[in-house]
Image (spheres, grey):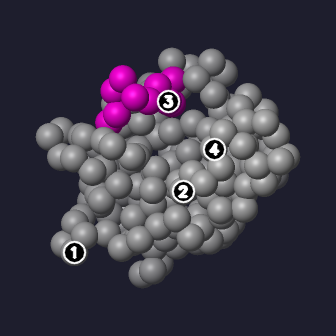
Amino acid sequence: MVNLEFGRVDAEGWLWGARRVDSPHCDARPEGCAISLLVVHNISLPPGQFGGPGVEQLFKNRLNPEEHPYYASIQGLRVSAHFFIRREGELIQFVPCILRAWHAGVSNWQGRAGCNDFSIGVELEGTDDTPFDDLQYAVLNRLLAALRAAYPITSVAGHSDIAPGRKTDPGPYFDWARLTEY
């Protein structure tokens, strides 16, 4: 059963109720930079396969390039997100919200470059061509409510919105109308 009983972000930026898995792929946000954006992504490793350890291994810098041919092509990639929501609704936190996770890359939102500086990244286990699970939407809505209670988040965007032409996620199967906090 999925834990939907979470919601308090502590002073260090960890969300109570999320499973904590520390990622080394983060650093300090610029001083005085308020968190105002939540970026929705999708990810699956190997691509199109759900439920395995690949995403956690990637974000922890422990992905073995010999385990799958695709892993060799992303060897050395240093990325992370603050949160990862699995298909069955499990919520994992890799980076405390007060730190900058490396999820957006070259990006721009409403005239501001470098979205990692002022955003929280949420990865949904999925692909551009697969509908997301009902539990993922439920967890994402609860997460967004908790984050808005802790930070001045004014916008929610897809990776494709902040890096058009470079990124396509969360993809056409992400139903923006299902975000009650949107």
Q: Name the residue nearer the viewer: 26 or 173.
A: 26
Residue plotted at (27% across, 51% down):
114
Residue 129 seen in this snapshot: yes
Look at the magenta stretch and give its main secondary structure.
loop
Labels 4 and 1 touching (C-beta < 8 A): no
Labels 2 and 3 touching (C-beta < 8 A): no
Circle 4 Cα neighbour tier, 10 Å, few/some/many (<14 / 14–19 / ≥20): few
Q: Name the residue nearer the viewer: 104 or 171.
A: 104
Which residue bears the numbered disc 1?
A: 31
Q: Amino acid at mark 3?
A: Asp
Distance Cα–Cα, label 2 vs label 1 = 23 Å
142 part of magenta stretch: no
170 part of magenta stretch: yes
Distance Cα–Cα, label 4 vs label 1 = 31 Å
Which residue bears the numbered disc 4?
A: 74
SS at circle 1: loop
